[in-house]
Amino acid sequence: MFDKILIANRGEIALRVVRACREMGIRSVAVHSTADADAMHVRMADETICIGPAPSADSYLNVAAVMSACEVTGAQAIHPGYGFLSENARFVQAVEDHGLTFIGPSAKHISMMGDKITAKETAATLGIPVVPGSEGGVNSVEDAKKIGRDFGYPVIVKATAGGGGRGMKVAADEAGMERAYQTARSEAKAAFGNDEVYIEKYLQRPRHIEIQVFGDGQGGGVHLGERDCSLQRRHQKVFEEAPGPSISPESRAEIGAICANAIAKMGYRGAGTIEFLYEDGEFYFIEMNTRLQVEHPVTEAIFGVDLVREQIRVAAGLPLSFSQDALQINGHAIEVRINAEKLPNFSPSPGTITQYHAPGGLGVRIDSALYDGYRIPPYYDSLIGKLIVHGRDRTEALARLNRALGELIVDGIDTTVPLFHALLQERDIHTGAYNIHWLEKWLEAGGLER
Ligand code: MV4
C-alpha cells in the first residue's frame, strides 16, 4: 500500500479523499492555488503545497506543477478527484512515465472512452446495448441525411470529442439536418479542436440512468447498481438518487451483469460510470465516465462501501474487497448539490460565508469544504457542498431530505437550497415521475415562483 497520496483537486472532493487516506493510514498531500491557501482541504491534509496562481489552467490543470509537487513531497500516487486532470490521458501517461501511480484507469481506457465513437463501438462489441445510429463518423450532409432517412427523424448530431452535452444538435426532420450538422461540426471544432460528428436516433423523453462499475484491472469486475440523475439544468445535475425509482430488481440485475462483464473483459481498473438513456424499459448506452463522480455518495450509502478506499486499493494492486454477491442494496439515498448560485438564473454567487451550520442526525451526510468565515473564490466550480440523505425507503429519504434542508444554514451568499425546498413541494418528485426534461420545463413554467 502507498505511504503517501497527492490529491490533485480542491474543495469537497479533495477533502473526501483526505478522509479515505486518513482512515487507511496513508499520508495525504493537498495541492492548492494561491486562492485556496485557506481552504478546508488544505487544513485537513497532512501536507500542503502551493502549485500556482488562482486560474485553474495555472494550478490544478498544470501538469508540470502537479508532477513537481509529487516529486517534492515524495508522494507515490495521485488521486485526481473529478474534473480537472481526472480524464486526461496525457496526464496519466506522464504520471506513469515518472514511475508514479495514477489512482484511476489506464491511459488506454481513458482515451478509449474520451473518443465517443470508439466508446460506443467498444460498448457494442462488449454486448452493451447502444443508441441506434451512424456507424462511426459522418463526413457530409448527404450522408447525414441518408442516416436520418434510415433511422427516422428526429436524430441528434454529436461531437466525437464531446460529452456532457457540448457540440450536440437535434434535427427534427430532413429540412433541419443541414443546419444541425453544420452547427454541431463548427461548435465541435471550436470547443474541442476536432470537428468529427456522429449521429444517433433522438430519444425524446428518456431518463439518465448511470451504472456504477468497478474493475480490479485483472479480469475482475462488479457493478453497484444505478443512479438516476435525470434532474439536470443545462447538463448540470442538481439532484441524484439511488436506486432509480423506475428500475426493477430484474432490470438492474440484467444491465448490471452486462456492465460488470464488460468491465471484466476490458481489464478495466478502478471506478467507472456507464451512462445510459432509459426509455420505455430499455437501456441505451451513450457514454462512459472513467472517474469517480460527484454523486458517488448515494451509491456508497445504499451499498455501505467506501468507493475512494476501493479506488486506492485497486490502484495499489489489491483485489476488490467485495464480490458481486456481497453487494446488496440497503434502502434509498438522495443527493442534492448545494451550489453558490443565485436563483432563478443560477448565476455564480461567490463571497464570504457569514454563518454555516451543517445538518446532522440519522441518515444525513454532508460532503463539503465549507466553514464559518470561508471566502468562496470566484475562480472555480460553484459546487460548495453535497447533502446526502439515506432512508429505509424513498419516502423516508425524501422526508429526511426535507428535515435536513431545514437544519442547514449557509448565510452570506446565495445557494441552490431554495430550489430543493421548492422541488419537495412537487408531486412528480414524490412519485419519481421525471425525465431529463422535467427540471427545465418546470423552471420555465415558473416552478421556483410557486
Ligand atoms: C441524447 C439525448 C437524446 N437522444 N442522445 C446530453 C448530454 C450527453 N451526455 C448526452 N445527452 C443527450 N443525448 C440521444 N440519442 C438527450 C441528451 C440530453 C440529456 C441527457 C442526459 C441528461 C440530460 C440531458 C438533457 C438534454 C439532452
Image (cartoon, rainbow, N blue to C red):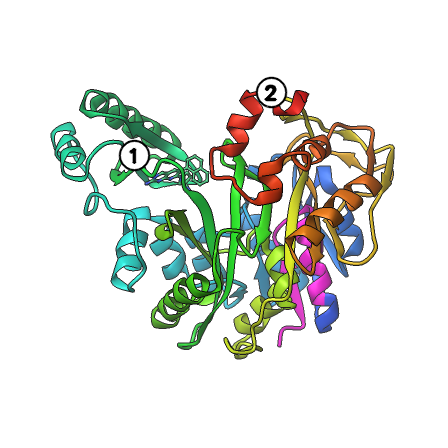
Q: Which span of residues is magenta-colored? A: 1-21
Q: Secondary structure at mark 1?
A: strand
356 up-or-down from 287: above or below: above
Q: CA distance from mark 2 to mark 1?
A: 28 Å
Residue 446 has which mark?
2
Tell me if I can see residue 31 in this picture: no
Q: Secondary structure at mark 2?
A: loop
In-image side of 122 versus 289 (left or right): left
On-image quarter of the N terminus: bottom right
| Residue placed most toward the observer, 57 or 248 | 248
For label 1, being within 8 Å of ligand 1 is answered yes
Amino acid at the residue labelled 2: Gly
Amino acid at the residue labelled 1: Ile
**In this view, the mark in front (2 or 1):** 2
**Dot 2 or dot 1, earlier in sequence:** 1
Q: How many numbered circles does the render carry?
A: 2
Residue at horizontal 38%, vertical 49%?
Answer: 287
- The residue that disc 1 covers is 156
279 up-or-down from 104: above or below: above
Tell me if I can see residue 230 in this picture: yes
147 up-or-down from 63: above or below: above
| Residue placed most toward the observer, 304 or 76 | 304
Q: Is residue 127 magenta?
A: no
| Residue 305 position in % (x across, y down) | 63, 68
| Residue 76 position in % (x across, y down) | 60, 68
Which corner quadrant of the image does residue 33 belong to?
top right
In-image side of 21 versus 174 (left or right): right
| Residue 289 position in % (x across, y down) | 45, 53
